[in-house]
Image: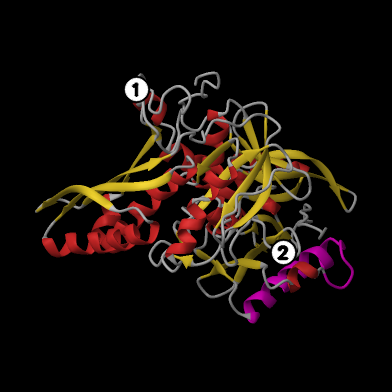
Amino acid sequence: MILDEISFRSPPRQPASSWLAGSRDRRADAAETNPPYLIEVAADEATRAAYRRLRRSVFVDEQGLFRGDDGDAVDADPRTVVLVARSSDGTVLGGVRLGPATDGVDLGWWHGGRLVVRRGRGGPAPHVGAALVRAACAHAVEAGVLRFEADVQARNEKFFARLGWRTVRTTTVVGSPHVRMRFPVDRIATLAAATKLPLGGLLDGLVPGGAAFVGDDGAPVPGSDLVAACDAILPAMVERDPTWAGWCAVLVNANDLAAMGAAPVGLLDAVAARDAAHAARILEGLRAASAAYGLPVLGGHTTLGAPASLAVTTLGRTADPVPGGGGRPGHAVTLTADLGGRWRPGYTGRQWDSTSTRSGADLRTMTAAVAAARPAAAKDVSMAGIVGTLGMLAEASGCAATLDVAKVPRPDGAAMGDWLTCFPGFAMLTTAEPGAAPPPAGPAVSAVCGRLREGTGVRLRWPDGEHTDAIGGPVTGLGATRKDTP
């Protein structure tokens, strides 16, 4: 493990001070003049060299913490990011480094460290340390990080708490008492709350799907072997990317039927567009996807001269639908995902397009996988992302889930935070007894990457054995299925 940043109180009237932002009296800071500065990535070697000189003046010359140089393997790691605070005349006033905490593949677990602020006449430049900490947090979140930590001196624990950091545990670094603190990255919980949490209240009393299929991707039609599914596409997407919207309207419905183990029968569409040309582009994508997925258009409705909108209803057939709430504590969680493709242009970090370049045969093989495997529970990954969808499956199953981050199948070039919160094209979560065969999904990749357990919510498990809460409770508020219901 690489030594993290260490902060010691500097002797007075020294040229520089290492500072985990806040060791000085805040009233003294307020009395000083705050010079203008800009925080930016150190993009050239000269800036990085100025940052390293500032570090040496503190960690080597002032404190004697290191002999000769405080450089280490983190500095040499090309993944390490250095942020600096630069004054209007170009002087580097301070800096901080951050980067992956593990060697090899970046799992979305980063550490911050080596925070240093130049000392002026009255001490360290006021507020620069706090600004660097905030900038490091923002940069980490933007980079798709889900776990961001630092080891801070015990006396700075309260300061970091004021910046929103949370204490994990006490630790010791080179003989000095420190506290490991974690910045709460709530990206997963925020997405789940925004996309799914209102459903329980909105659907109260409707019981969609019946008591045995609460929150499922499709609804069994009573008295038949039909399953119905319905999805609407965001109007903004229909307006700006109509052909892709048409494709996706079929895609999401095909995945809904697939999660239920249903064979496709056909679809009905409801299209609104400002004019015929725009409607034609929507239908172009819908027509192509209909052919690729084997979901013929049975009928629909088109309105022109209206704001853009698109909704599709599909029908499938199965005598024994696979429920989303059929899991139980002890079940292994498998993610089956198509890792081919790329980020859809204009939707980087939000929509992974693995489907538009696949053959119809490949798409139909993937969407038949659940029917072939017959797992205890299945859900296709929705706009709540992989973790949010796992939370929905666990909630419907009356339990909680743990996801092992290092075992999640993920495309090259997709940050962990993006992958776990995006719409992935084709991705299916299934649960079964440990040792069960994965769904036979052709070009898609399957991996056991979690388990169901007692409780509520979803936790992430990291390579060091640490667990972090991704979702603290129910995702939808719809409750659990009635497993005794036929």
For the N terminus, give its image quadrant.
Answer: bottom right
Instruction: Look at the magenta stretch and give its main secondary structure.
Output: helix
Image quarter of residue 108: bottom right
In percent of width and height, residue 480 lies at 52, 24
Q: Neighbour class for label 2 at 10 Å: few (<14), some, many (≥20)? A: many
Q: In the image, which disc is placed on residue 206? A: 1
Disc 2 and disc 1: Cα gap in Å? 65 Å
Q: Is residue 204 above or below residue 312?
A: above
Q: Residue at x 57, y 28 (%)?
A: 397
Q: Name the element at disc 1.
A: loop
Q: Position of residue 103 (x, y in %)?
A: 76, 64
Of callouts 2 and 1, the N-terminal one: 2
Residues under numbered marks 2 and 1 in contact, where contact means CB atoms less than 8 Å apart: no
Picture disc at residue 16: 2
Q: Position of residue 356 (x, y in %)?
A: 41, 65
In magenta segment, residue 50: yes
- The image quadrant that residue 12 belongs to is bottom right
Q: Residue furthest left?
A: 305
Task: Tell me the element at label 2.
Answer: strand
Q: Residues within 10 Å of mark 1 (few under 14, many from 20)?
A: few
Q: Is residue 20 visible?
A: no
Is residue 343 shown in magenta? Answer: no
Residue type, label 1: Leu
Foreground residue, 473 or 481? Answer: 481
Q: Residue at x 44, y 67 (%)?
A: 359
Residue 330 seen in the figure:
yes
The magenta segment: 45-69
Query: Which quarter of the picture shows residue 328?
Result: top right
Q: Amino acid at mark 2?
A: Ala
Q: How is the image coloured?
A: secondary structure
